[in-house]
Amino acid sequence: MSAVVDRTVWNSYQALPRGSLKHEDMANVTGAQVEMVTVPALGPEWKASELREVTRSAKKERNAEARGKKWKEWRRGERGLCCHWFTWRFTVFFVFGLCIAWVDHPSSRNTCG
């Protein structure tokens, strides 16, 4: 490796090519030195709200909201527990049928004898 380093390669500010400027801009720039200005940092890369979204408590909160939404939809009859099956109305009739079957079962009768 050579001890002499070419400084022109490491220069981060390079002059713009002449073809990229408009005609009005070229009149102002010809012969003048181009000054480069650095822009200060715009703040932290992540906002506090974005950092909150990746925490475990935020994930639990999102899951709780999703469960609440599904519960409300099920109670309204908009969705079932298994796709469109086992809706709230079906559950009521199913439990009613189980109660009738249990009452009508011979072992549930109270016989004295």
Image: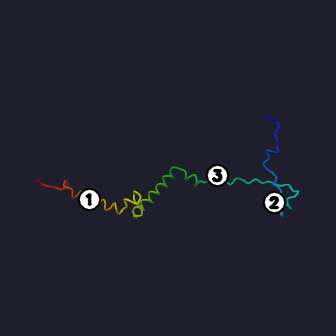
Q: CA distance from mark 1 to mark 2?
A: 86 Å
N-term-proximal mark, 3 vs 1: 3
Query: Which residue of the protein is positioned furthest toward the right in this rendering?
Result: 31
Question: Where is residue 6 shown, x and y percent of the image?
Answer: 82, 41
Residue with the mark numbered 3: 45
Viewed as shown, does residue 96 lie left or right of 16? left
> What residue is disc 1 on?
99
Comparing labels 2 and 3, the label whose residue is closer to the camera: 2
As displayed, is residue 56 above or below residue 86?
above
- What amino acid is at disc 3? Glu
Circle 2 sits on which residue? Answer: 21
Q: Earlier in the sequence, mark 2 or mark 3?
A: 2
Q: Are marks 2 and 3 in contact (CB under 8 Å)?
A: no
Q: Residues within 10 Å of mark 2 (few under 14, many from 20)?
A: few
Q: Where residue 16 appears, x then y in whole percent? A: 81, 54
- The amino acid marked with disc number 2 is Leu
**Residue 36's spot in the image, x, y percent?**
79, 54
Residue lying at 58% horizontally and 54% vertically, measured from the top left: 50
Q: CA distance from mark 2 to mark 3?
A: 33 Å
Question: How many numbered callouts?
Answer: 3
Rendering quarter of residue 33: bottom right
Q: Which image quarter holds the N terminus?
A: top right
Q: How far across and how far down the image is residue 99, in percent? A: 26, 59
From the viewer's perspective, tell me whether residue 40 is left or right of residue 99: right
Mark 3: few/some/many CA within 10 Å (<14, 14-19, 20+): few
Q: Amino acid at mark 1?
A: Cys
